[in-house]
Image: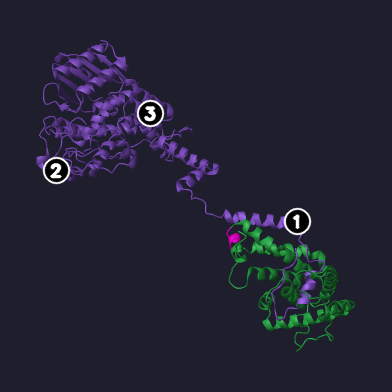
Amino acid sequence: MKPTVPPPDADRDAWLSEALRHAPDADVAPPPSLSEMILREAQAKAKPAAAATPRPSVPFWSRAWDWMARPAVGAGAASVMLASLVGVMMWNRPLDDMSPRPKLDTPSAPVSALPNAASAAMPADTPSAAAPAQATQASPPPREASRQFAPVAPSADADTALRRDRLGVAAKASKPAQPATAMLEKKREALEQARVAESAQARERRAEPAQTAAALQDDKQRATLKAPPDALAKVARTAESMSPAAPAVEAVEAVEAVAPLTAAPVATASPTPMPPPMPAPVAAPAPAPVETPVPAPTNQAPKANMARSTPAPSAQVAPSLRQPAPASVPLASGFAAGVVSATPSERSFVNLRATLAAEPAPWRWSRDGSAPRSIDDSLSAFLAEVDSVAANRWQAATAGLAETSAKGRVSADSAGFRDKLATGPAVRLLHDGQPVHILRLDGHVLRWERLGADPANASMTLTVTLSEAELLALRRALDQLAP
Amino acid sequence: MHDLNDDALMSAYAAGDASAFEALYARHQASLYRFIRRLLGPSMAAQTDEVFQDAWLRVVNARAQWDPQGASFRTWLFTLANNRVIDLWRRSGREVSIETDDDSDEPWEPQGAAWQHWPAPASAVVPSEDLAFWRRAGERLLHCLDELPLPQRSTFLLHHDDGLPLAEVAAALGVGFETAKTRLRYAMSKLRTCMGAHLAPLQPEAAQGELR
C-alpha cells in the first residue's frame, strides 16, 4: 500500500512528502491479531446496543403470580390461610377446660334470678303480664343474664351449655369457700322463696290469656327438656363429678344452664310482708311462674312494677291489678306465715324435671299407691310427655281438689284422702318419703298437685284440660310406667 | 456500506451495525498505525500497538457519544491517537514542549536549497535509480523526524503524511491555525536542513540527470 499523493498545498513540501512515501515504514500495518481483537471488541459492544430494544412488558398478573410462587411468600400465605381456617372452625366454640377445676363452693345466683334477667332483657313494649319486677330485687349478675339467653339446647348441646356454665363459674373461683351443705341450703331457701312468689304471680295472671316472650322462652326450654331423659341425667352427673366439694349445687347449676328458666320474675305485690332477705348469694328477685305468663296492660305495667317493688303491704298498688282469685287467699296465708319450703326448686314443671334429673337421690315415685321406686327413665319419659302436652297451659285450680290447708300444710293423709276422691290414675313424687307432687289424670283434666313438704308450706293445684289426642298420648305414656 | 462516508459509518455503528465499524477500521487502520508509529519514533515503536488499540477502543466506547458535528471522523480519530501518544510520551519522562520555538517570527531556513537538485517528487513513474534515492531519503527523513519536537512532528505528519488540511491539523491538535502553520514551517525547515545535509551526495547525480 502506497500512501496517496497529497493534494497541492502551498505549505506542503513535495520532496518531503515523497520521502515519506518511500520511507521504510510506509507499508506498515497493524498485526492481524490486533486487528481481530479490535474488531471482536467492536462487535461485542455493538450487540448490546442492537439488543437494547425494550422487552415486551410482562403483564401485572404474571408478575404477581411469579411473586406468589416464591417459597417465602407461598409459605406465608399458606400460614395465614391455615390460621384463618382454624379460626373459622373454632369460631364460637368454647375452649375445653382440660385443667383441673378449682374448688368451687360459692353457689350461683338462685334460680329465681334467672327469670328476672329474662324479663329485664325483654322489649319494653312487650305486652306481658310477666313484666319485669326487678325493682324489688337487685338486678341479676351478668352471668345470669347470659345464661338466660343461652341457646335452648337439645340434648346434644347440653355439654356445650354445661361447659359455658363452667367457664362462668370458674370466674367466681376466687370467692371464699363455704361448705357445700350451707350453699345448698341457701339455694333451697332461695328456690322456695321463688316458688312462693311464683304461686302468687300465677294467681294474678290466671285471667290473662296472651303469651309473652317469656312464654316463648319457656317453649324453647321445654323443647330442651323433651330430649331423652338420660341426657339431663348425664348433665347432672357430669356436674357432680366435676365438683366433688359441692356436687348438689353444681348439679343444679348445670341443669339450669341446660334449661334456663325463662319466665319473667315478678315480685308479687302481696299484702303480706316478704320473708326476710336472704344472704348475698340468694339476693335475687323472685321468679315468676312459667306456666301462665300472660301479658299485662302496658299502661299499667310500670305502676304495677313500682307497687311490686315495694316490700311493704300493697296499699299503694292499684286494686285493679289484683286478681280476685279464691286460691290466693290460702296462698296469702302461706306468705303470712313466712314459710319457706325445704324442697328443691320445682316452681315449674320444667324445673321439676330438672330437679329430678339433677338430684334424683332423695326422690321416689309411685303409681296408684304402689311401692315407691327410684327415679328412672320411664318416669322421666312420662314427665317429658306431661310437659309436652301441658306446655304453658297450667291453670290454677279454683275448686275441687285444689284445696289447701289453712296453714299451708298438706299431709300425707290428706293426699291420700284426695286420692280416694279422685278416680283417675295418679303418679306421686315423694321427696324424702313425703309426697310432694301428684300428677293425676282425671278424665280430660290433668292435675298437678304441688304439696308442701314441710308443715309450714303451702300447696296448690294446677290443671290442664287435654284434648283427645293429648289425652291419648298421655295415657300411652302413663301405660309405659310400671304399676 | 463502503460507499458511506466516515460520519455515516460511525453513526451506523453507534446504532449497532458492527459492519460499519469494520468499514471504518479498514479505511483508517493503516494510516493511523503509521501515524502512531512515526509519532512515537524508533525509540518508542514498541508502544505502537498499545496506542493503536487504545485509540480504536476509545472509538468503540465513545460510539454512543459520537456527534458528527464539528471535526470529521478522521480528524477525531487522529486526535485520539495524538493525545494518547502525548500521554505515553509524558509517562516515559520525556519533555513535551508545546512552545518550543513557535514564538519566533521566522523559522530557520537552510541555505543552498540542496533539495532543489533532488528528483521531481511527484513523478508518476519513478526510475529505479530514483527509487533508491527516495528510499534512502525516506530512511533519512525518519531519523530527521525523530529529532523534531513532538508538536512539530505531529503537525508535519498530519499535514504531509495523512494529507489533512492545515485547518484540520490545527483542530486535531487543539491549537490555533497560525500555531499549526508555524509548527509546520518549523518542522519543514528542520527537516529540509536535516535532509539536505545527508542527501548532499546525491546532488551530483541529480545535477547530472538534469544536465542530461
**Where does the image place residue A351, in percent across and percent down from the top left?**
27, 28
Which quarter of the figure is the N terminus of chain A placed in?
A: bottom right
Apparent colour of chain B:
green
Viewer can see residue B150: no
Q: Quadrant of the C terminus of chain A?
A: top left
User: Do the CB atoms of the residues marked 1 and 3 lie less than 8 Å apart?
Assistant: no
Q: Dot 3 corresponds to which residue? A: A159
Secondary structure beneath label 2: loop
Structural distance between the alpha carbons of marks 1 and 2: 116 Å
Q: Residue A431's image quarter?
A: top left
Q: Disc 2 residue type?
A: Thr
In screen coordinates, is A50 left or right of A224?
Answer: right
Q: Answer with mark 1 or mark 2, whichever residue precedes in sequence.
A: 1
Label 3 marks a residue whose chain is A
Instruction: State left or right for residue A270 relative to residue B85.
Output: left
A382 versus A312 height, above or below: above
**Of the numbered discs in the image, which one, if any, rests on residue A298?**
2
1 or 3: tag closer to the N-terminus:
1
Q: Mark 1 points at which residue?
A: A32
Q: What residue type is labelled 3?
A: Asp
For the residue labelled by badge 1, is the local secondary structure a helix, a strand or a loop?
helix
Chain A drawn in what color? purple
Identified at 56% across, 55% down, the residue is: A52
Location of residue A477 with respect to B106 vertically, above or below? above
Main SS, magenta residues:
helix
Report the mark closest to the observer, 1 or 2: 1
